[in-house]
Amino acid sequence: MAIVIALTIIAGFTIQFAMGRSTLAARPLVHLHGLAFMGWVVLFVTQVRLATSGPLSLHRRLGWVAAGWAVLLVVMGFAITIDVARLGKTPFFFLPQYFLIANPLTVLCFALLTASAIRRRRDPDWHKRLHICATIAIIGPGLGRILPMPLMGPYAFDIVVAVSLLFPFLGMIRDLRNGGRIHPAWWRGVIAIALIVPLAHVIANSPVGDFLYAAITTGHPGAAMPPWEFGPPPPMPS
C-alpha cells in the first residue's frame, strides 16, 4: 500500500512534467513545498520498510524525525495555499474560496490522523493503519494530476477525495479476507478524510469563509479574483 501510494504521487507529478504543464521555473516557496511533501513520501515508505523488515530501533528513532516533519507539512500546506490565493493563482478547476478552505483542511486531517497514529504507536494494528490513512489524506495533489480535473466542474476537489478513499477500502478488503473483520482504524481514517468535503463546503459558504478570503487576499492580486468563479485556464504548451 505504501509503495502504491508513493507511486501514485510520483506518477501524477511526472506526467504533468512530461507533458510540459509543470516546469522547474517556479518560485522558491513552491520548491520548498514540493521538497517537504516528497520528503514525507520518502520517510513514509522508509518507515514502512523498517517496520516490516527492521531494525525496529531505527524505525522508532526515525519516527520522531517524521513527527517533526509532519508539523513542517502543516506549515507548508497553509503557506502555499495562502500564497496561491494572494497571487490569484488558484488552479483554474477550483473555486478560489473553496480551495482556500479545503486545502488546509486536508493537512489538518493529515495532522490529526498522524497524531492519532503516534499516540497508538504501541499498538501496531492501529498505528500502521492510521499512518496509511494520514498519508492518503494528502494524496490529492498527486492523484489530481492523474485524473481529468478540468472535466469535473465544481466537484473536482470532492471527486479526488472520493477516489482517494479507494485506498483504505482496499485495506478493509484485505482485513476481511485475512481476519474476517475490518479493523476500526480504517473507519476512523475514512470518516476523517470523508469529512473534509462537507466541512469545506460549510465553512467556505459561510461568513467565516467570506471573512478569511477577504482577509487573506486584501492588498494582493488575488483580491481581484472573484472567490466563486473559475479562473481562466493557462495557455497550452507549444
Image (cartoon, rainbow, N blue to C red):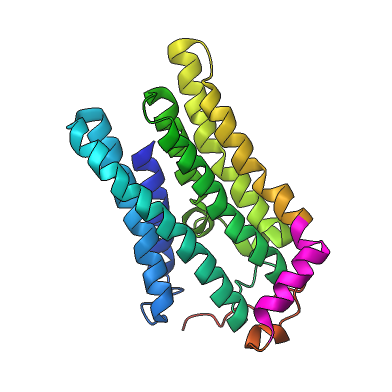
In this rendering, the answer to whether 227 lies above or below 193 is: below
Q: Is residue 29 left or right of residue 58?
A: right
Report the magenta stretch's main SS: helix
Looking at the image, which residue is at 47% across and 41% down?
115
Q: Please say if 113 is above or below 201.
A: above
Image check: 68 left or right of 223? left
Query: On the rendered structure, is 214 left or right of 47?
Result: right
Q: Nearer the viewer, residue 75 or 139?
A: 75
Q: Could you say which is closer to the camera, residue 78 or residue 96?
A: 78
Tell me, yes or no, whether the highlighted magenta stretch contains residue 175.
Answer: no
- Residue furthest to the left: 55
Residue 68: x, y in percent? Answer: 36, 53
In this rendering, the count of numbered labels is: 0
User: Residue at image x 42%, y 82%?
Assistant: 27
Give the residues drawn in magenta, as a range: 203-218
- Residue 213 in which image quadrant: bottom right
In screen coordinates, is 81 left or right of 8?
A: right
Residue 232 visible somewhere in the drawing:
no
Residue 103, quarter of the rendered image: bottom right
Quadrant showing the N terminus: top left
Spot occupied by residue 144 in the image (x, y as percentages of width and height): 54, 57
Q: Nearer the viewer, residue 184 or 173?
A: 184
Residue at x 65% of width, y 50% of height:
159
Which residue is located at x 47 percent, y 14 percent? 177
Spot occupied by residue 112 in the image (x, y as percentages of width and height) = 53, 44
The reply to whether residue 4 is in sight is yes
Spot occupied by residue 109 in the image (x, y as percentages of width and height): 56, 47
Front position in the image: 16 or 181? 181
Q: Would you identify the image quadrant in which residue 45 lies? A: top left
